[in-house]
Amino acid sequence: MKRLLVGLACAVALAGCGEREQPAKPAAPKAAAAPVAGDAKAGKAFAETTCQECHGLDGGSVAPGVPHLAAQSERYLLGALRAYKAGKRGHAALKVIVERMSEADIRNVSAYYAGLPATGVLRAKDVSHASPYESGKARAGSRCAT
């Protein structure tokens, strides 16, 4: 009886090992379309009216705590601006600015700042125009000194 049961179990197991139809292989992912290059001249015009107060026209920030944009990777700049627009990154001023920016504006400004040389980006030029963090730190230091 044992042999019969073992024989049946082996037969069932071998029957399941037959050729099965293989599932279709997923199609190879399509290569991502190359991003449309931005127009650096249009980006400069936008930067002159909107960005230069904080980031400078040469891409060097004008205050401590404000990031330098010159010579940053265009991919990084695109991603950062898109993240601000999607609400994934937060900054009060940038939120208002990117809400008004079209996708073309984002590409253009990214192309402009990415194309600038990093030589002008050494340090903030106007330390009196400091970030709120720097202002608070200065006020706290003056109170602690007395």
Image (cartoon, rainbow, N blue to C red):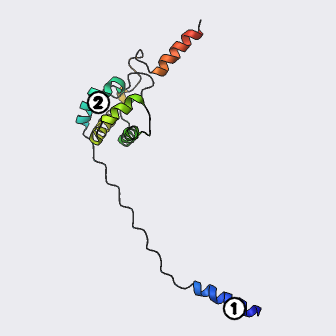
Report the side of 63 relative to 39 (left or right). right
Q: Amino acid at mark 2?
A: Ala
Q: Would you place residue 134 above or below residue 31 in this image?
A: above
Give the residue displayed 26% in from the left and 27% down from the top: 49
Give the Cα distance between marks 1 and 2.
81 Å
Q: Which residue is mark 1?
A: 7
**Depth order, front residue of 60/15:** 15
Residue at x-position 39% and y-position 67%: 27
* Tag 2 residue: 47
The reply, left or right, for residue 16 in relation to residue 59 is: right
Q: Which mark is residue 66?
A: none
Question: What amino acid type should be assigned to the residue bearing mark 1?
Answer: Gly
What is the tally of numbered marks visible in this picture? 2
Where residue 104 sits in the image (x, y, percent)? 27, 41
The location of residue 29, given as percent across then percent down, is 39, 62
Vertical relation: 146 (above or below) 115: above
Name the one closer to the observer, 139 or 45: 139
Residue at 32 percent across and 28 percent down: it is 51
Residue visible at 43% across and 74% down in the picture: 24
